[in-house]
Amino acid sequence: KMSGAMAQSIKKTPFNARHRQLGARMVEFGGWDMPIQYVGIVQEHHTVRTKSGLFDLCHMGRIMFSGPRHREFLHRVLTNNVLDLEPGRARYSLVCNDRGGVMDDILIYADPKATMMVVNAGNRDKMTSYLSREAASFKGVEMVDESEIQAMIAVQGPQSVAITSELTTMNVGD
């Protein structure tokens, strides 16, 4: 059981009530009340590997970058090239400090006008602080932390494209 102060400070994703309704085993993770499993880890692992699984990733940090030079800025702070990243595509990368030490492993999602960086839940504050400081000295970059105003889910497994294709007119197979 959580203490009264902790219970009030823990964050809930927009899907929290549904997780509970479906019987998820919930735990505190990075300040969030998150589902850890529903029916059992072995069965859930097998289902995702053979069919598909849906994951609540609202606890992850989501930082949006825009402006005429935002890709140049990201190219400077990431270890992988993002200048050639096409809209609708994603790329894994690292953010390193000034000495080359890894601060976080991240994902970049490209859009025609903006780029979203997904950072690990426990590193969100550190990353937004660092990236904000770096962006301040780089003209033509706007940065907005959308972590608490935008939900995020992942659909994983071999049937993911077929399942998500039924939910949108976008060609998710591409």
Image (spheres, rainbow, N blue to C red):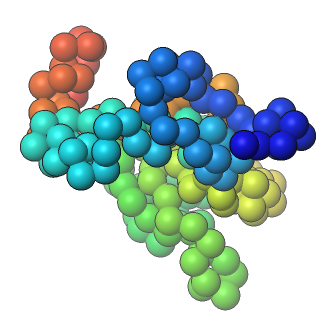
Front-most of residues 37 and 91: 37
Is residue 49 visible from the viewing direction of this image?
yes
Relative vertical location of residue 113 with respect to residue 36 in this rendering, above or below: above
Judge from the rendering whether residue 72 lies leftward or rightward of residue 169; answer left or right: right
Q: Residue at x 64, y 47 (%)?
A: 28
Question: What quarter of the picture does the C terminus occupy?
Answer: top left
Judge from the rendering whether residue 28 lies leftward or rightward of residue 159; answer left or right: right
Q: Residue at x 40, y 42 (%)?
A: 37
Residue 30 location in percent, x, y?
Answer: 66, 52
Residue closest to the far right: 5
Relative vertical location of residue 106 with respect to residue 31 in this rendering, above or below: below
Residue closest to the far front: 1
Residue 7 location in percent, x, y?
Answer: 79, 36
Q: Quadrant of residue 119?
A: bottom right
Q: Residue at x 56, y 19 (%)?
A: 17
| Count of marks, rendered view | 0
Is residue 143 visible from the viewing direction of this image?
no
Q: Quadrant of residue 81?
A: bottom left
Q: Quadrant of residue 13?
A: top right
Q: Residue at x 31, y 50 (%)?
A: 41
Question: What quarter of the picture does the N terminus occupy?
Answer: top right
Residue 51 location in percent, x, y?
Answer: 13, 37
Residue 45 location in percent, x, y?
Answer: 23, 49
Judge from the rendering whether residue 73 lies leftward or rightward of residue 92; answer left or right: right
Relative vertical location of residue 147 with respect to residue 49 in this rendering, above or below: above
Judge from the rendering whether residue 86 lies leftward or rightward of residue 143; answer left or right: left
